[in-house]
Image (spheres, grey):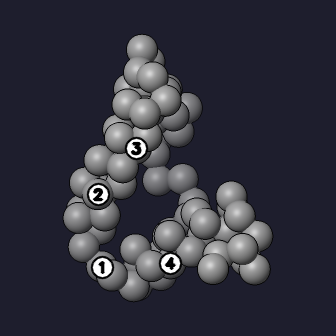
Amino acid sequence: MKLDTGSRFEDPDAAYRLIVEAHRGLDEEESRRLDAALILILSNQIGDLALLEEALRLARSSVAPANAAG
């Protein structure tokens, strides 16, 4: 299965607002812990190691140059 990077939400803006609202009132550390918990929950929902690997590669490339990956 290939990672679907297109929007699958009927209302992508509403999905974004949900994520933003979940962080409201949290300090930076709490926000990072929320993100980590959400990543683990959604990774389990994906349940496919190859898709998870592809998603992580894509996410990593959006925040760090490929040569900085280690």
Residue that numbered label 4 is attached to: 54
Q: Which mark is residue 40?
A: 2
Q: Quadrant of the C terminus?
A: bottom right
Q: Which mark is residue 48?
A: 1
| Secondary structure category for the residue under label 1 | loop
- Between circles 1 and 2, the one closer to the viewer is 2
Is 42 left, or right, of 3 in this rendering?
left
Is 3 left, or right, of 39 in this rendering?
right
Is 64 left, or right, of 52 in this rendering?
right
**Label 3 crowd bin: few (<14), some (14–19), many (20+), radius 10 Å:** some
Q: Position of residue 64 (x, y in %)?
A: 71, 64
Q: Cα distance, mark 4 to mark 1?
A: 10 Å
Q: Please tell me which residue lies in front, 32 or 4.
A: 32
Q: Amino acid at mark 4?
A: Glu
Residue that numbered label 3 is attached to: 35
Q: Cα distance, mark 3 to mark 1?
A: 20 Å
Specify which label sits upstream in the sequence, 3 or 1: 3
Q: Cα distance, mark 4 to mark 3?
A: 18 Å
Q: Position of residue 29 (x, y in %)?
A: 43, 33
| Secondary structure category for the residue under label 2 | helix
Decide: marks 4, 2 in contact (CB < 8 A)?
no
- Above or below, 4 relative to 26: below
Is there any visible trace of residue 69 in the rendered image?
yes
| Secondary structure category for the residue under label 4 | helix
Which residue is at a point 76% across and 70% down the rendered structure image?
65
Which residue is at a point 56% across and 74% down the rendered structure image?
57
Q: Position of residue 49 (x, y in %)?
A: 33, 82
